């Protein structure tokens, strides 16, 4: 996820030349996780395979959401509003009763602040 984050931030910088290579490195991570999950399944370690596949699924979801948000930048075609994506993340975090830590609360607060700034610009 750290590599994906760096690639996304690079996508916001028009002068950054490293963006494609950062996405390629992240893509290799996804491929490696998938191969490891496949090997874990072959070895009968379903729990490990599921953990690895969840990482792949979550990372791909983050990639898709980031690309949708980036498509909302001025001059781009927008299919989904950034506000809708962030609202869905907030709802998901609030509904996740398994995780209870200050980091989650801070993340929710940060997302709510982002929502306020988006609503002001609408």
Image (spheres, rainbow, N blue to C red):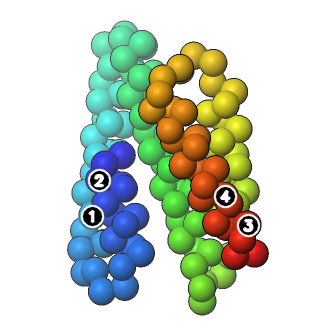
- At a point 55% along the width and 57% down the height, the residue shown is 64
Between the residue at mark 3 and the residue at mark 2, the CA separation in whole angstroms equals 29 Å
Mark number, residue 22: 1
Quarter of the image with the C terminus is bottom right
- x, y percent for residue 104: 51, 32
In the figure, residue 97 lies in which quadrant? top right
Q: Are marks 1 and 4 in contact (CB under 8 Å)?
A: no
Residue under circle 2?
Answer: 3
Q: Which residue is mark 4?
A: 115
Note whether 87 is above or below 44 in the view shown.
below
Q: CA distance from mark 4 to mark 3?
A: 6 Å
Q: Residues within 10 Å of mark 3 (few under 14, many from 20)?
A: few
Number of residues whose C-alpha sits closer than 10 Å to that of mark 2, classed few (under 14), some (14–19) or many (20 or more): some
Say whether marks 2 and 1 touch (CB < 8 Å): yes
Give the mark nearest the N terminus, 3 or 2.
2
Which residue is at 51% across, 41% downward? 107
Q: Secondary structure at mark 2?
A: helix
* Helix, strand or loop under label 4: helix
Determine which of the numbered discs, if any, sits on residue 119 in the image. 3
The mark lying in front, picked from 3 and 1, is 3
User: Label 4 crowding class (10 Å Cα cut-off): few <14, some 14-19, many 20+?
Assistant: some
Answer with mark 3 or mark 1, whichever residue precedes in sequence: 1
Q: Nearer the viewer, residue 89 or 48?
A: 89
**Res 104 seen here:** yes
Tell me the CA gap for discs 2 and 4. Answer: 25 Å
In the rendered structure, the answer to whether residue 100 lies left or right of residue 11 reads right
120 relative position to 103: left or right: right
At label 1, counting other C-alpha atoms closer than 10 Å, the crowd grade (few under 14, some 14-19, many 20 or more) is some
**Is 6 above or below relative to 43?**
below
Q: Secondary structure at mark 3?
A: helix
Distance between the alpha carbons at the discs numbered 1 and 4 = 28 Å
Q: Position of residue 41 (x, y in %)?
A: 38, 19
């Amino acid at each position: 996820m750290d590599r994906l984050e760096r690639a996304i931030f690079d996508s916001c910088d028009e002068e950054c030349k490293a963006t494609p290579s950062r996405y390629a490195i992240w893509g290799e991570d996804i491929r490696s996780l998938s191969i490891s999950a496949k090997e874990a399944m072959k070895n009968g370690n379903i729990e490990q395979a599921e953990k690895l596949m969840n990482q792949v699924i979550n990372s791909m979801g983050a990639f898709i959401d980031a690309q949708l948000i980036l498509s909302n930048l001025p001059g781009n075609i927008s299919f989904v509003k950034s506000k809708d994506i962030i609202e869905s993340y907030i709802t998901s975090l609030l509904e996740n009763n398994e995780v209870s830590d200050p980091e989650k609360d801070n993340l929710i607060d940060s997302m709510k602040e982002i929502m306020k700034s988006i609503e002001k610009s609408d």
